[in-house]
Image (tube, rainbow, N blue to C red):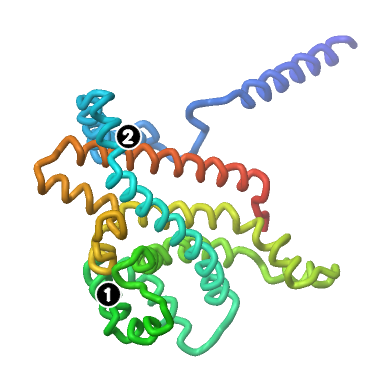
Amino acid sequence: MAQPFAVAGLKGDRKLTERRNGSRWRFRQPSVLPGFGLSLGITLSWLVLIVLIPLSGLVFRASGLGWSDFVALTLDPRTLNALKISFGTAFLAAVINLIFGVILAWVLVRYRFPGKRVIDAMVDLPFALPTAVAGIALTTLYAPNGWIGQVIEPLGLKVAFTPAGIVVALIFVGLPFVVRTVQPIMEEIDKEVEEAAATLGASRFQTISRVLLPGLMPAGLTGFALAFARGVGEYGSVIFIAGNLPYVSEIAPLLIVIRLEEFNYAAATAIAAVMLAISFAMLLFINSIQAWSRRRYVYVA
């Protein structure tokens, strides 16, 4: 009579062992789709050729300058001011895009109105429009004799040929990143969630701040990071409206081009290396916050 119990015990131990082995971390998770090795190899090879090798060349060229020369070129007042303008305007434009991009995505998802498809298509216009064309159009509008500039300049507001013009250009090119990142997440949130919050006595502000925004936070941070990264490296739409005045409205990408035209490759390399380091650090920080918010506030449909 003890044999069935022994067999049952062996089966139980086997299941426990299998469960423990299955809970271990694996480099490759089980999948019904074949071709993991081939697809991973193609992915890594493509990333190495397109991303890693060019960036490694930049770092290698910057390391050849020497620490004293690199610090001297980096701490040049004109370089520091250009970096400050580039990152400051990109951050401000990304914050504005985050706020109004979420509002625009909310309108496109939650409401029906005439011309909705036209507005939805206009969101993607900065993707298709050449950046130089966007810069010329914005300069024409916000110049002192432009349609908008001649109205706001008597009020003491000057946009063109100032850092404010840079922010306007970066808002234009960065808005689609936020809208198209947040919009699919909004579409997955059922209206019944809002109705349930209202029946439980939540106000509209509480419904937005405690029910909707936590679930949208990871997507919003992703759109913010994309808009910020696009703004830091933007060149075509900015050079026309910025005025490109040293110490006033000169961006770092333009200063790199100027140094290259002067055949000052060391200075151009130093500026590019600093931009790479700052951009990588800020994006890493934003992605860390995004991962934390996804674990804490992820929305479950």
Examine the rendered structure and indicate whether residue 277 appears above or below residue 179.
above
| Secondary structure beneath label 1 | helix
Looking at the image, the residue that sits furthest to the right is 1
In the image, residue 112 lies at what x, y percent?
56, 84
The residue where tag 2 is placed is: 44
Of the residues under marks 1 and 2, which one precedes in the sequence? Answer: 2
- Whether residue 51 is visible to the viewer of this picture, yes or no, is no
Question: Which of the labelled discs sits on residue 139, or is there none?
Answer: 1
- In three-dimensional space, the C-alpha distance between marks 1 and 2, rounded to whole angstroms, equals 42 Å
Which quadrant would the C terminus be assigned to in this image?
bottom right
Say whether residue 98 is left or right of residue 14.
left
- Whether residue 184 is visible to the viewer of this picture, yes or no, is yes
Q: Name which residue type carries label 1.
A: Thr
Question: Which of the labelled discs sits on residue 214, or is there none?
Answer: none
Examine the rendered structure and indicate whether residue 280 appears above or below residue 93.
above
Q: Name which residue type carries label 2.
A: Leu
